[in-house]
Amino acid sequence: MYIPLLLASAPLISSVVAKQCINITVPVSVSARNGVFNIPTLRGNADATTFAQNLTSIRGNFTEEALLDYATVSGAYNISAKFCKPDTENGTNPTVQVLTHGLGFDKTYWDLPFNSFNYSYIDVAVDHYGFCTLSIDRLGEGNSSIADPLRVLQAPAEMSALYELTMMLRNGTLPSVPHAFTKIVHVGHSFGSALSYLLAIMHPAASDGLILTGFSQNGTFLPTTVASWDSKLARLNQPLRFGNISYPAFSDALSMLSASASNLTAVAAEGTSGQSNVTLGEIQQLLQTTDLADFLAGAQPSQLPHMADLPTGYLTWTDAGSNQFAFLLPNFFDPSILLFAESTKFPFTLGELLTIGNAPPVAPQFKGPVQIVTGRQDAIYCGGDCLATGDPALASIPAKSKAAFPAAAAFEAYIHPNSAHAINLHYNATGAYHVIQRFLGAQGLAPS
C-alpha cells in the first residue's frame, strides 16, 4: 500500500468525502527550445485585432513569417497543482492521471465548482474508479508562475514543465506525494491535449497512456475560432482580475454604470407604455453577456493577486458570445454555466497561439494506448461536426489521428454526442468521463 498523503502540509479541499485532495506548489526547472518571434509589443485592443488578422490570413503561415530564430529558454517556476487520491486505498499499484487544461481555463476545469461539483471529472475518476489525479495550472495560468507571454509561454516550454512534473511522479519526488508511480496517464483538453501529444513525441517513455479530449489534428478551423474570439488584452477585458485598475477607480466607473443602468431601466419602463422597444430582459442580456459583464468580473477582491497587471501579451476572447461559439453547443448546456465560465475565464498568450499547431504529425515511438475524446459538434477541431469527414472509410475527423500513433498499443477515437469543444461544461459530461475510465481499465491501466 502506498504511503498516505501528508495532509498536514496543505489544506484539505475535497468536496466529497470519498476522496482526499491537497493543494501543492511544485518548483520546476523549465528548459526548452522556443521560437524567437518578431511580434511588436501590443499597446491596446487594436493591436490584438491586428495580431489576429495576421494569424488568420490565408496569405501564408504567420508563425513562419514572424519566426526569426530559435533560442533556449530556461528558468525556475512554480506550478500549482491539486493531487487527489481515493479515501480507501484498495491496492499497491495506483495509477495517476495528470490533467492538463486548455486555453481559457485553469485546473478547475477538471473539478468545476459549479452546481455542487456535479460536472467534476476528478470525482468520477477518483470516487468511482479509484484513480489518483494530479490537476495542474499550466505555466503562466491560475496559481502558477506568470511568465513572458511571447518569449516563454509557448508549447515547448509548457511541455517542459509537464515533463518535469511527470518525472517527479515517476521518481516519487513530487512534494507531499511520496510515491513513485509506475502507471502514469496524461489526460489533456485542447491545448492541454496538444502538450500531452508533444510530450509523447519528445519523451515517449514518460507516459503510459494518452487521453486527448477536445482534440484532432485538423487545424482547418482554428482561424475561424481565433476570429470569433475578437481577442482583447486580458488586462483591459477584465481589468479587476488581470489589469491594474484601482478599486476607487472601479467604484467611480461602477457609479457611472449604475446611473446608466437606471436610465436604461427608465427607458424600459417607457417601453411598457409603447414609447420604447427596450425591455428589462434586453437590459439583463446587456449586463450578462457583453463585454460589460467582463468588466464587472472580479468585483470582489481577487483570489489571484499575482495575475493582476498582466503583460499585454496575455489575451482573452471578448464576451460570453465568443465563449459559446468556441466551446459550447446550444441547448445542451446550462445557460448559467456559460456566465460562470465567462466570469472565471483565464487568458491565453501570443506564444501559445503561435505554437499551438507546430507539433510533428507523428509520435512514432509512443507505445501506450491512445484515446481521443471529442464532442461531435466541436467547432475548433471539427468545424461543428466531427462525423463530416467526406470519406466513407473514415469514421470521424479525430479518427484520422490513428496514423499519428503507429506504435500505440491501442487507439480509439470516441465522439461524444451532443457536445462541443468544452465537453466538461455540457449536461452529459459525466458520460464521457466514464468512457475514459473504462478505456483505461480495458488497457490494463486501472489501479491495482
Image (tube, helix red, strand yellow):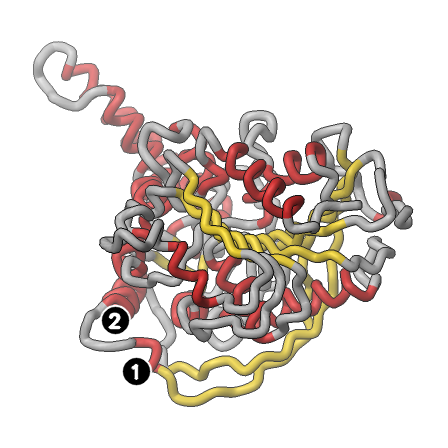
Element under label 1? helix
Number of numbered callouts drawn: 2
At x 45%, y 50%, the residue is 413
The disc, 2 or 1, on the residue closer to the chain's N-terminal end is 2
Residue 65 image label? 1
At x 69%, y 53%, the residue is 81
Three-letter amino acid code at disc 2?
A: Asn
Q: CA distance from mark 2 to mark 1?
A: 10 Å
Where residue 193 appears, as percent x and y from the top left, is 51, 58
At x 59%, y 48%, the residue is 107
- Outermost residue on the top side: it is 273
> From what the image shows, is residue 199 above or below residue 260?
below
Determine which quarter of the picture holds residue 328: top left
Determine which quarter of the picture holds residue 50: bottom left
Q: Are marks 2 and 1 in contact (CB under 8 Å)?
A: yes
- Outermost residue on the front side: it is 393
Visible residue check, residue 427: yes
Where residue 111 appears, as percent x and y from the top left, is 61, 39
Residue 292 image label? none
10 Å neighbourhood of mark 1: few (<14), some, or many (≥20)? few
Three-letter amino acid code at disc 1?
A: Glu
- Outermost residue on the left side: it is 275
Residue 54 image label? 2
Where residue 135 appears, as percent x and y from the top left, is 65, 50
Element under label 2? helix
**Quadrant (top left/top right/bottom left/bottom right) for the C terminus:** top right
> From what the image shows, is residue 263 above or below residue 384?
above
Visible residue check, residue 199: no
10 Å neighbourhood of mark 2: few (<14), some, or many (≥20)? some
At x 78%, y 38%, the residue is 86
Most foreground residue, 429 or 395? 395
